[in-house]
Image (cartoon, grey):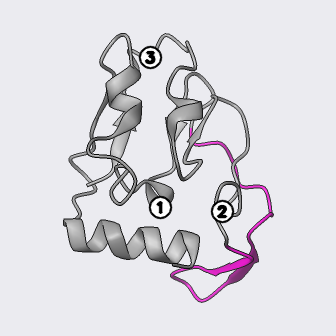
Amino acid sequence: MAIMITDECINCGACEPECPNTAIYEGGIEWTWGGGTSLKEVTLEDGTVVDADEKQEPLSDEFYYIVTQKCTECTGFHEEPQCAAVCPVDCCVDDPDHRESEEELLSKKKFLHGE
């Protein structure tokens, strides 16, 4: 499963630099597929191809957020999700709406980093 940041986030920013996939963004900041990955372009579920550096709409305007499609729970990098390990208010939690097996997370890591 991916990790999500709850609305209890205090916007301290401790989580953002810990993410090996650059899946964490400050509220109101646009995100990209390419940031922190080896992606050059991405084919979306509807077949649309987007440049990996094309800015995407922020998922939250109020607090830090995690792009589910880029979150691997640090699988293949660390033993545990680093955002959750450093969060001072424990608001980086499992996202019950996005459950993934270790195999799926490793596949996502391979997709993001071309390994």
Image location of residue 77, percent across then percent down:
40, 53
Give the main secondary structure, helix, strand or loop, of the magenta stretch: loop
The residue where tag 2 is placed is 33
Relative horizontal placement of residue 62, taking residue 51 as reference (left or right):
left
Label ID, residue 9: 3
Question: Which quadrant of the view contains residue 83?
Answer: top left
Relative horizontal placement of residue 66, taking residue 81 as reference (left or right):
right
| Tag 3 and tag 1, C-beta contact below 8 Å | no
Indicate whether 112 appears above or below 74. below
Relative horizontal placement of residue 2, taking residue 26 as reference (left or right):
left
The magenta stretch is 39-59
Image location of residue 10, percent across then percent down:
49, 10
Label 3 or label 2, whichever comes before in sequence order: 3
Could you give the CA–CA distance between mark 3 and mark 2, rounded to whole angstroms? Answer: 23 Å
Label 3 or label 1, whichever comes before in sequence order: 3
Q: Check disc 2 and report its element: helix, strand or loop.
A: loop
Taking the spot 80% from the left edge, 63% from the top edge, the residue there is 54
Label ID, residue 69: 1
Taking the spot 58% from the left edge, 20% from the top edge, the residue there is 13
Q: Check disc 3 and report its element: helix, strand or loop.
A: loop
Image location of residue 39, percent across then percent down:
67, 73
| Tag 1 and tag 2, C-beta contact below 8 Å | yes
Amino acid type, callout 3: Cys
Amino acid type, callout 2: Trp
- How dense is the environment of label 2, judged by Cα within 10 Å: few (below 14), some, or many (20 and up)? many
Placement of the N terminus among the 4 image quadrants: bottom left
Could you give the CA–CA distance between mark 1 and mark 2, rounded to whole angstroms? Answer: 9 Å
Could you give the CA–CA distance between mark 3 and mark 1, rounded to whole angstroms? Answer: 20 Å
Q: Check disc 1 and report its element: helix, strand or loop.
A: helix
In front of the other: 101 or 10: 101
